[in-house]
Amino acid sequence: MPTFRAPDGTELAYHLRGTGEPLICLPGGPMAASAYLGDLGGLSAHRQLVLLDPRGTGDSAVPDDPSTYRCDRQTDDVEALRAHLGLERIDLLGHSAGGSLALLYAAAHPERLRSLVLLTPGLRAVGIRPDEEEWERTVGLFADEPWYAETRAAIAEFGPGTPLEKILQVVAPLSYSRWDAAARAHNDATTRNWEAAGGYYAGELPDPAAVRAALATLAAPVLVVAGDHDSGVTPGSAAALAELFPRAELAVQAGAAHHPWLDDPGAFTRTIAAFLAPDVDTVTVDGTRLAYRTWGEPDAPPVVLLHGRCGSSLDWAELAPELAETRRVYAVDLAGHGLSDWHPHNAHNLHDPHNEPSAPGRYSLAGYRDQLAGFLRALGLEGATVIGHSMGGAAAWLLAGQEPDLIGRLVLEEAPPLFPLDPPRPPAERTDEELDFDWPVIDGINADLNAPDPGWHALLPQIAAPTLLVGGGPGGPFDQDQIAWMATRIPNARLATIEAGHLVHQSRPVEFLAAVEEFGL
C-alpha cells in the first residue's frame, strides 16, 4: 500500500487498481474510505485508478488538527498526491462529496488539471441546490417501493440538529436504483469517519461565487455524470453545474442513482472511458452518445468510416492513417458498439419485484441510417465521402437513397443487398464471453436481413453520389451476383471484386486502399 506525506505531515494512503494512465479518484461519503469505489464498474480496465483514502479514513492517518478535515483544506492533499506521483497534470475524478473537493481543487489549481470527471458530485462548493419540484419527481420514481413511505416520513422529520449519520442511514435506499441485497451490502461496507464527516463542510468555506468565477475560466475538459434516479444530485442540478464550465459535457445515465457504476457498469465505463481517451471524441445524436475517432488535418476533405455489425471504429485502425494523408477521417462507433451508448435493455425495471430487464428498442438498419444522418449534420459533414462495411454499408446506402445530398461519394464494402435471406437466420444464442458490442444487435439486424423493407430497393436509383461497390468474392456471406445487381441499379456506380471474403479492408488492406484511391479518394 503506497503512502505519501501531506504538507502538514499527515501520512496519507492510496490504492492502485488496473494499469495505464493514472486517474486520481476522490471518494465521497463525506469522508468515506475509498474501498467502496471498487474498480468503478470495470473502469480499471481502461485506466489505472489511484484511489485516495482521505485523511482519517481507510489506511490514511488521523491528522493532528481536526480542522484539516474541511474540504477546502484537503485540496493541499490532492496537490501533494499529484506531486508525489510526479505528474505535471492530472486526470481527476470526484464522486459525491469528493466532487466538492474536486471542484475546489480545480478552482485552486486549474493549471494542474488535464481533465475532470464529476460523478454525481456534491454541489455545495458552487452553491447549487436541487429544484424542489425536480427533487420530488425524482424521489417519486421510487414511490412503489415497500420502503418508500417509511423513508419519506423519516425525511420529513429531519431538522437542523439531525445527525449526519442518521440522515445518510435514512436516505440510503434512494442512493441505489435497486435497494436489494447487493445495494445493502455495498452500503454497509462503506466506512466513514463520522467525526471527519462532520467537519467536511464546517466553518467558513470559500465563497461559492468566487469558486464559480474560477471554474468559468477552466481550460480542462469536464464531464459531469448524473443518474436519472438520483435525488441527491438531480439531472437538472448536474446540468446547472455543467453550464459553469467553458468545456463541459453532461451525461445522464438511464436507470442510475447515486452510484452509477453499480447500476449499469458497462454504460458507466463506456461513458468515462470515451471521455478520458485522448483519441476519442463524442457527439450526441437524438439522445444517443456516439463515440468516434479522427485522423488527419481538420480542414482536409472529410471521410466517414462505418464498421460492420459487432465491430467498432477500431476496425479501421490500419486503414485510417493511410486515408488521413489526404483526408480528415472520422470513424464512428455506432450505437451498441465500442464506446458509444448501448440501448438500456439491461436496465432493470425499478418497480418489477422480479427485477426483469426492461424491453429494449430494437437495433435496426433504419436506426443506423438515421444515426449516420444525425452524425453528419451534427459535425457539419454534409457532402462527405462515406465508406461503409457490411451493416454500416447498408445504413450508408439507405441514407444516400433517402437523402441524396448528404453524401458526396460512397464506398460500399460487402454491403448487404437486402434481399430476404433464404433460409432466414435463426435467433442467435448468447455466448458467455465478455463482448464489446450489445448482444441484441445480432438479432435486431438479422430481423432486417431476414425480412427487409420491400421499399428499400427503390432507393438505389435515387443515389446521386458516385458509388464504388466492393465485393469480397464467394467467401463472403452475401450473394455476389446480388451485389453486382446493386451496381446496375445505382446510376453512377462501379463494382470491384477483391477475393478476400467479408472482411476486405482488414484482410486485404493494400488492395482495398488501391481500389478506393482509383475510385478517386
Image (cartoon, rainbow, N blue to C red):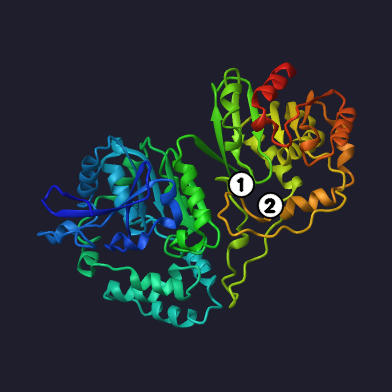
Label 1 element class:
loop
Residue 58: x, y in percent? 24, 63
Closer to the chain start, of discs 1 and 2, is 1
**Mark 2 secondary-structure assignment:** helix
Q: Is residue 207 left or right of residue 95?
A: left
Q: Quick check: 292 left or right of 73?
A: right
For disc 2, the neighbor class at 10 Å (few under 14, some 14 to 19, many from 20) is many
- Residue 143 point in image, percent of width and height: 54, 76
For the question of whether residue 456 can be seen, the reply is: yes
Whether label 1 touches label 2, CB < 8 Å: yes
User: Tag on residue 337?
Assistant: 1
Give the image quarter of residue 291.
top right
Number of marks drawn = 2
Please give left or right for residue 314 compared with residue 442 in the image: left
Q: Amino acid at mark 1?
A: His
Question: Residue at label 2?
Answer: 441
247 or 280: which is nearer to us? 280
The foreground one among 23 and 166 is 23
Query: For the residues marked 1 and 2, what is the alpha-carbon distance in whole angstroms?
Result: 9 Å
x, y percent for residue 492: 84, 23
Question: Looking at the figure, which quarter contains the C terminus?
Answer: top right
Residue type marked 2: Val
Q: Which quadrant of the view contains residue 60?
A: bottom left
Q: In the rendered image, which quarter contains the N terminus?
A: bottom left
Location of residue 123 (image quadrant): bottom left
Whether residue 210 is visible, yes or no, is no
Residue occupying image coordinates x 50% and y 63%: 263
Callout 1 crowding tier (Cα within 10 Å): few <14, some 14–19, many ≥20: many
Task: Tell me the residue at 83%/51% (across/down).
Answer: 450
